[in-house]
Image: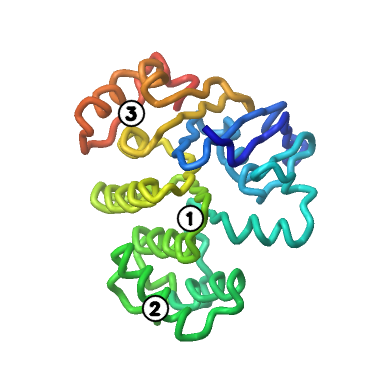
Amino acid sequence: MNTIIEAQRISVTLAQFPVLTDVSLSIPEGMSTIIIGKAGSGKSTLLKTLAGLVVPDEGKVLYRGIDIGRASLAEEQHFRSESAFVFQDAALWANQSIYNNLMIPLSIHFPSLSKNEIDSRIREIVQRVGYNESLAYRPADLSMGEQKLISLARALIYEPSVLFLDEPTSSLDMESSQHITNILLEEKKKGTTIVAVSHDNRLISRLADYVCVVFNGGIADFNTLENIAPRLGKDIQRLLRSKGQEQASLDETSRDIYS
């Protein structure tokens, strides 16, 4: 099994508060790793540090063996063109149309694409994710589910090797959550490396190959889903058996660390 991203003894302090302390972690290539943990444990900061959006105060993050914090401009651009990040709040450009929200990152990463090629990719990706509304709309015209769908489409439009997602199904109804999960499962089948923060046990049970548990700024556990499931409580074990469709929460016995 190849490692695509490796964190080596990283520590992060934000506003003079230690968020991550001496964290080491290897992300397997072509697999789905789900990061879980209670609120304030450092899981979102870990995700953003692995994605190169937060620079660690100590340690380093390697992408295919290259330290992204000390990479050359060409190496950094290569990493950006091979990775994409989906924010929890969608983070669409409010003053731009949906079309421009999809066009701008594509034109930045692939400046050689013609206008017709860009237009073709945009039409293809919105069809692929199931967005059926006008591309002239602005984010404020969309529901949260639609905004998350466009945010995911924006990440997928340049076919990244690594997809980072922060709570991709939070604040969504069951139907929208299942739709997002199904899209991610298709990406997983294509061999895309997925690294996501989530507390949605339905998503975890369907998508995860590995689960990383963050607790008090450190890694409390990292294992395959099958091996770690007994420590996550009965609900997720039930979902693994049945691939059930209802939202599940962690048992009280595991809630202190895992929720």
Amino acid at circle 2: Tyr
| Residue appearing at x 67%, y 35% in the figure | 7
Determine the residue located farthest toward the top in the rendered image. 253
- Relative height, residue 130 to residue 197 (above, below): below
Q: Position of residue 163 (x, y in %)?
A: 50, 50
Sequence-earlier tag: 3 or 2:
2
Residue that mark 3 sits on: 249
User: Which disc number belongs to residue 137?
Assistant: 2
Residue that mark 1 sits on: 89
| Residue appearing at x 40%, y 19% in the figure | 227
Q: Position of residue 177 (x, y in %)?
A: 31, 49
State the SS at label 3: loop
Sequence-earlier tag: 1 or 3:
1
Amino acid at circle 1: Asp
Amino acid at circle 3: Ser
Q: Position of residue 224 (x, y in %)?
A: 43, 25
- Relative height, residue 55 to residue 8 (above, below): below
State the SS at label 2: loop
Q: Quadrant of residue 99?
A: bottom left
